[in-house]
Amino acid sequence: MSTSHPSHAAADCNSDVTLRDGLAPDDDSAIRDIVASTGFFNPREIEVAVELVREGLARGDASGYRFLVASLDGRAIGYTCYGPVACTAASFDLYWIAVHADHRRRRIGRLLLLETERRIAAAGGERVYIDTSSRAQYAPTRRFYERHGYVCAALLPDFYARGDHRLIYSKQIVAAV
């Protein structure tokens, strides 16, 4: 069951933004729109984002994916998808973080990231890993992660394509006691 509540952190970016745990039945189309609006992802990558949403809708927590959705006036405008890394004691992956292009530069990404980290810590997580591309287009994304305490822990050359390296960012967080 998902819950909706205004976030205390929302006051510093947009007091009308609410955060919701989990997914609603129509989130697959809303998240498709969010991811497509960014201009960062190709059609196959957009489909992967939607597939994870559908998996989350179909299997809930058993899917291994957790979702946090930012909404404005009842409409999804951003989200994160994250989950524990299998066979690790306290590591989590942040698979997706995206904010609709119409709502960027309003600190909603920051709100989503910080709240996702808080939830990971509450679940006993101690480390967060995020994959991104080395392409120039992703420079703002990398700066965003770095501003929030993430460091580039690994580079896998030519992972996505020739000259497009996979960068793995990591951050140590304090697990809730």
Image (cartoon, grey):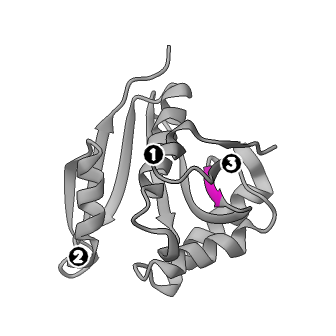
Front one among 8 and 111: 8
Q: Which residue is drawn at 42% across and 83% down?
A: 39
Q: Which residue is drawn at 68% across and 48% down?
A: 20
SS at badge 3: strand
How crowded is the residue under tag 1: few (<14 C-alpha within 10 Å), some, or many (20+)? few
Q: Is the magenta stretch mostly helix, strand or loop?
A: strand
- Identify the mark nearer the N-term, 1 or 3: 1
Q: Which residue is drawn at 23% across and 50% down?
A: 146
Give, as a three-letter code, the residue at label 3.
Answer: Arg
Quadrant for the N terminus in the image: top right
SS at badge 1: helix
- Identify the mark nearer the N-term, 3 or 2: 3
Q: Describe residue 103's horizontal placement relative to residue 73 as left or right.
A: left
In which image quadrant can residue 3 be found?
top right
Image coordinates of residue 30 in percent, x first then y, are 68, 72
Q: Foreground mark, 3 or 2?
A: 3
In the rendered image, which residue does mark 1 sit on? 12
**Is residue 84 at all visible to an observer of this figure?**
no
Q: What stretch is highlighted in magenta?
A: 67-71
Q: Residue at x 78, y 68 (%)?
A: 26
Q: Foreground mark, 2 or 1?
A: 1
